[in-house]
Image (spheres, grey):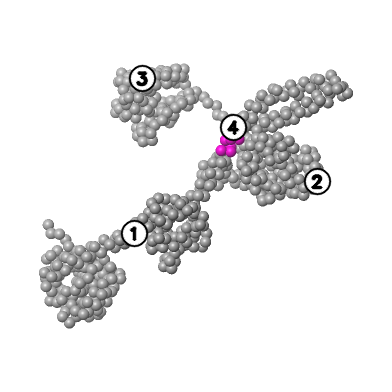
C-alpha cells in the first residue's frame, strides 16, 4: 500500500511545465493543485490547506515574493519553495528573506526536487508542531485563573493575561520594568516574601498591590525552572479575596452557631438551678411572713426579719428570670400588631415611672403604618422592651435619645437558611437603638450570656436582662442582632410575620403503628440480639417472623419457604453482605419485596443495592412506628 504524501500547491504560468511537474509528483504520491497566476494561488490558499507551495518567481499578475509575504502572514503552516530561472536567482534569495524555505532552478533536477520536498515536508511538520505547541501554551496560560509570572531576581520577564485581569499590569508596564517587589505588599510576612522572590518551592499566603494601589489577599506558589536554557523562577499568584470573604462569613456563622448552642446549654442549666432555688426560696419568703404576722413593728427583730423577706423576694425575682430563659414550656401566643405592643409598653405605668428618673432622655418612635402581624406572647414582648429600653436608659442617662422602630422586611434565619442566595421570608423588624457610649467588642461577644453584665457590680441588674431578651426571641423562632451605632448600640429583633388572625399551635404529629395481617417476614441480620428485638416487636404488630444471622442462612431458608418481605442488614460479618445476598435472591425471585436496614454503608454499595429495586432503606436505630409504616407501604405497594 502506497503512503499518501503531503498536499502541494503548484504555481506557474507555463501550463506545459506545471502539468509535467504534476504528473511527476503524482507518481510519487503527492497530491497537487495548480494555479497559473497569483490571484488563483491566493484563492486556493483560502480554500485549502497546503503543507508545501512551489511558486514561480515571475508570474503575470504579481511577483512570487508578494505571495510569499501573504503566506508568511496568513498561512504560516505552509512551507514555500521558490522556482526560478537563471536570471531570477537574486529574486529567489529575496523571497527567502521574506520566509521562503528554499529555491530550485529551472529546469528542475527531479532527484534534487524530491529531496528538497522531503526536507520541506519535515520542516513543515516541525513548524506545525511548534505552532500547535505555542497555541496550546497560550491557551493553557491564558485560561488559567492565576497570574503566571516568570522572573529573574524579581524582574518580570513573562506573564500571562491574568496579570492584567487580576492586578491591572499590562504588557507595556512589564516592558517598563515592573518587578515583583512592586507587586508584593509590605504587609506580607518576610518568610512569604522570601519564598516568592527566591523561587523556593512551596506555597504561601500574602498580599499584593494592584496597579490602582488597592491591596488584595493572594495565594502564591513558587519554584525555580529552566526557561530558554536559563535558570529562572516562576511564581503563580491566585486572588483569594472571595475565599477570604467566604471564610470570614463562615467563621461569623460558626460563632453564631456556637453562641446559640452555648446559650441553649446555659438555658437548660438555668432551668435546673431555678427548680432547686424555688424550693429553697419558698421557706425564705414564706416563714418571715408567718413571723411578721406574730410580731409588732416595735419588736426588736421585726426590721431584720423584714429585710430577710425582701432579700428573699429579690432572689425570687431572679429565679423568675431564670425560668424565663429556660424556654422549657410553650407559651400561649396570639397574632398581634407589633406597633400596638410597643405603644402599650410606652404608655405603661412601669415605663413612665422609670422614664421619670431620666428626665433628660427622649424616647422616639418610627412605626411602619402597614406593619404585618406576628404570632407572639405579648407579655414576653413587653418584657423584651422593658429590658432593652431599660438598658438604653441606664447607658445614656443624661441628654440622650432612644429610638424604637418597626418595619416589614424579608429575613433568612442564620440557623435555618439552606442557601446563600435565599431571599428570606416575611418578618417584622423591631429596632431599639440609642446614642449612648455603645458596647465594646469584648462585651458584645458575651452580651447575651446569663449573669454577664457591663454595669457596676451591685449597682443594678442581675445580668439576666439581655439573656432573657435572647431567649424570648428564640422562643418566637426569631433572631436578635447587636450592632454598633458609633456611638450607641442597636438591637435588631426579627420576628416571623403572619397574615393569619390567629396563631396555629404547632404540635408533633401523632405517630400510629400500622399492624400486619399475618404476613411472613424474614429478618437477616448478623446480630442475634437485633433479630430478637425485631421479632418480638413485629410479632406484637401481627406478623409471623423468622430470623437468621447470615446471608447464606437466609438463602437456605428461602429455598424451603417463601416470605412476603425480607428485612436485610447491609453489613454483616464473614460471608455475603446485604447487597450480595440480595443479588442471589433476585436471581430466583426478581419481585421479592425487601427492606434494607443499615447502620452504615458505603455510597457505592448503597447505589448498587438501590439498582436491585429495594423498597426502603432504613437507618439504625429504627423506631417501631417508622418500621411498621415502611413494612405496610412495602407490602401494599405504596412505596
263 drawn magenta: yes
Which circle marks residue 231 in the picture?
A: 1
Mark-to-mark CA distance, 2 and 3: 82 Å
Give the mark count.
4
Name above or below for residue 460 compared with residue 70: above
Name above or below for residue 613 compared with residue 364: above
Pointer 4 or 2: first along the chain: 4
Residue of label 2: 359
| In this rendering, the label closer to the viewer, 2 or 3 | 2
Pointer 1 or 4: first along the chain: 1
Mark 2, Cα crowd under 10 Å, few <14 / some 14-19 / many 20+, is: few
Residue found at the far bottom of this picture: 87
318 lies left or right of 518: right
Q: Position of residue 463 (x, y in %)?
A: 68, 36
Residue of label 4: 265
Q: Position of residue 153 (x, y in %)?
A: 40, 60
Q: Position of residue 163 (x, y in %)?
A: 43, 60
Q: Decide: marks 4, 2 in contact (CB < 8 A)?
A: no
Determine the secondary structure under disc 2.
loop
Q: Decide: marks 1, 4 in contact (CB < 8 A)?
A: no
Q: Which residues are magenta?
A: 258-264
Pointer 3 or 4: first along the chain: 4
Determine the residue positioned at 51% across, 55% down: 187
Determine the secondary structure under disc 4.
helix
Mark-to-mark CA distance, 4 and 2: 40 Å
Magenta stretch: dominant SS? helix
- Screen quadrant of the C terminus: top left
Q: Decide: marks 2, 1 in contact (CB < 8 A)?
A: no
Mark-to-mark CA distance, 3 and 1: 71 Å
Residue 103's quadrant in the figure? bottom left
Residue 450's quadrant in the figure? top right
Residue of label 3: 548
Amino acid at each position: 500500500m502506497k503512503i499518501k504524501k503531503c498536499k502541494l500547491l503548484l504555481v506557474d504560468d507555463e501550463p506545459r511545465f506545471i502539468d509535467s511537474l504534476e504528473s511527476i509528483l503524482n507518481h510519487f504520491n503527492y497530491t497537487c493543485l495548480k494555479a497559473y497566476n497569483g490571484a488563483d494561488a491566493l484563492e486556493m490558499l483560502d480554500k485549502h490547506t497546503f503543507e508545501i507551495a512551489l511558486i514561480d518567481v515571475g508570474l503575470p499578475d504579481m511577483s512570487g515574493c508578494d505571495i510569499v509575504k501573504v503566506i508568511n502572514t496568513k498561512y504560516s503552516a505552509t512551507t514555500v519553495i521558490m522556482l526560478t530561472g537563471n536570471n531570477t536567482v537574486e529574486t529567489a534569495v529575496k523571497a527567502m528573506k521574506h520566509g521562503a524555505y528554499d529555491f530550485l532552478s529551472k529546469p528542475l533536477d527531479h532527484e534534487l526536487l524530491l529531496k528538497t520536498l522531503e526536507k520541506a515536508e519535515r520542516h513543515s511538520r516541525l513548524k506545525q508542531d511548534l505552532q500547535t505547541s505555542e497555541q496550546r501554551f497560550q491557551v493553557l496560560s491564558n485560561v488559567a485563573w492565576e497570574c503566571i509570572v516568570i522572573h529573574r531576581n524579581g524582574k518580570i520577564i513573562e506573564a500571562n493575561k491574568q496579570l492584567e485581569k487580576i492586578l491591572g499590569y499590562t504588557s507595556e508596564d512589564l516592558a517598563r520594568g515592573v518587578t515583583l517587589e512592586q507587586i508584593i505588599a509590605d504587609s506580607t510576612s518576610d518568610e512569604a516574601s522570601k519564598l516568592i522572590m527566591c523561587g523556593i518551592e512551596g506555597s504561601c499566603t500574602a498580599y499584593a498591590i494592584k496597579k490602582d494601589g488597592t491591596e488584595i489577599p493572594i495565594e502564591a506558589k513558587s519554584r525555580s525552572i529552566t526557561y530558554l536554557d536559563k535558570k529562572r523562577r516562576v511564581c503563580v499568584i491566585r486572588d483569594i479575596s472571595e475565599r477570604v470573604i467566604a471564610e470570614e462569613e463562615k467563621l461569623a456563622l460558626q460563632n453564631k452557631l456556637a453562641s446559640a448552642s452555648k446559650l441553649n446549654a446555659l438555658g437548660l442549666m438555668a432551668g435546673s438551678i431555678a427548680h432547686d432555688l424555688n424550693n429553697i426560696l419558698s421557706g425564705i419568703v414564706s416563714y418571715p411572713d408567718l413571723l411578721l404576722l406574730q410580731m409588732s413593728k416595735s419588736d426588736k427583730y421585726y426590721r431584720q426579719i423584714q429585710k430577710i423577706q425582701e432579700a428573699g423576694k429579690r432572689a425570687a425575682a431572679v429565679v423568675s428570670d431564670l425560668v424565663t430563659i429556660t424556654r422549657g414550656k410553650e407559651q400561649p401566643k396570639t397574632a398581634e400588631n407589633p406597633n400596638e405592643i410597643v405603644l402599650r409598653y410606652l404608655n405603661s405605668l412601669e415605663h413612665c415611672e422609670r422614664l421619670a428618673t431620666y428626665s433628660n432622655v427622649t424616647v422616639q418612635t418610627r412605626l411602619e403604618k402597614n406593619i404585618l402581624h406576628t404570632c407572639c406572647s405579648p407579655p414576653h414582648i413587653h418584657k423584651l422592651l422593658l429590658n432593652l429600653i431599660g438598658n438604653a436608659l441606664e447607658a445614656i442617662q443624661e441628654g440622650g435619645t432612644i429610638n424604637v422602630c418597626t418595619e416589614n422586611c424579608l429575613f433568612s434565619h442564620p440557623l435555618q437558611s439552606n442557601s446563600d442566595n435565599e431571599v428570606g421570608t416575611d418578618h417584622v423588624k423591631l429596632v431599639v437603638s440609642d446614642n449612648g457610649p455603645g458596647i465594646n467588642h469584648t462585651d458584645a461577644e458575651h452580651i447575651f450570656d446569663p449573669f454577664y453584665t457591663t454595669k457596676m457590680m451591685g449597682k443594678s441588674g442581675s445580668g439576666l436582662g439581655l439573656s432573657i431578651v435572647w431567649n424570648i426571641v428564640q422562643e418566637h423562632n426569631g433572631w436578635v442582632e447587636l450592632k454598633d451605632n458609633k456611638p450607641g448600640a442597636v438591637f435588631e429583633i426579627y420576628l416571623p410575620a403572619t397574615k393569619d388572625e390567629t396563631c396555629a399551635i404547632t404540635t408533633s404529629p401523632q405517630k400510629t403503628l400500622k399492624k400486619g395481617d399475618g404476613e411472613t417476614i424474614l429478618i437477616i441480620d448478623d446480630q442475634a440480639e437485633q433479630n430478637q428485638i425485631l421479632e418480638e416487636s413485629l410479632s406484637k404488630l401481627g406478623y409471623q417472623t423468622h430470623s437468621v444471622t447470615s446471608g447464606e442462612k437466609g438463602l437456605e431458608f428461602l429455598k424451603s419457604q417463601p416470605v412476603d418481605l425480607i428485612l436485610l442488614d447491609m453489613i454483616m460479618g464473614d460471608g455475603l453482605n446485604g447487597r450480595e445476598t440480595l443479588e442471589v435472591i433476585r436471581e430466583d425471585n426478581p419481585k421479592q419485596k425487601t427492606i434494607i436496614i443499615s447502620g452504615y454503608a458505603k455510597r457505592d454499595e448503597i447505589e448498587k443495592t438501590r439498582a436491585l429495586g429495594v423498597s426502603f432503606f432504613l437507618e439504625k436505630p429504627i423506631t417501631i412506628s417508622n418500621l411498621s409504616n415502611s413494612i405496610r407501604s412495602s407490602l401494599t405497594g405504596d412505596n
